[in-house]
Image (spheres, rainbow, N blue to C red):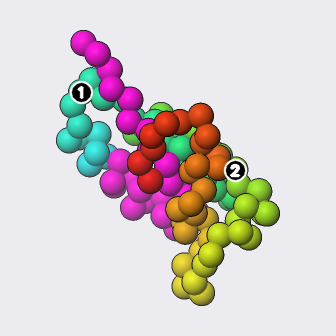
Amino acid sequence: MTTTTVQLATGLDSRYVTPLKVMLRSLVDHLDASSRIVLHVAHRSLTEAELAELAEIVDVRPVVLADSASRAIPTLPHFPPVPAARPIPAEFLPELERVIF
């Protein structure tokens, strides 16, 4: 059986870990069993424990954002910069041809 790897990328801080876990659990439950999910997590302050919680569900590849990268992200007062990191996957994952953000 051929394994399909699904590359996902997200930017988040601690406030978004629980909703992300719910989404990932649903994704795992509904994908074909031969699918492998790799989650690239852009962050500045997640703890090892928070990353481990995500790693219980999928393969996690943390990417710590430099302050300079975070400052370049357009933000709104009620939305922090790291979760708004939509344009960043092309910069921190240049080796991937496709990634779902």
- Disc 1 versus disc 2: distance between alpha carbons? 30 Å
Magenta extent: 1-24
The residue positioned 29% from the left and 16% from the top of the image is 2
Q: Is residue 65 magenta?
A: no
Which residue lies most toward the front here? 97
Q: Which mark identifies residue 64?
A: 2
Q: Classify 43 as above or below 77.
A: above
Element assignment for label 2: strand
Classify residue 74 by image quadrant: bottom right
The residue positioned 60% from the left and 56% from the top of the image is 88
Q: Which amino acid, by three-letter code, is at mark 1?
A: Ala
Classify residue 84 by image quadrant: bottom right
Q: Is residue 21 magenta?
A: yes
Quadrant of the rendering where the N terminus is positioned: top left
Answer few, some or many: residues within 10 Å of disc 1's Cα (few below 14, many 20 plus, some between 14 and 19).
few
Q: Which residue is mark 1?
A: 33
Element assignment for label 1: loop
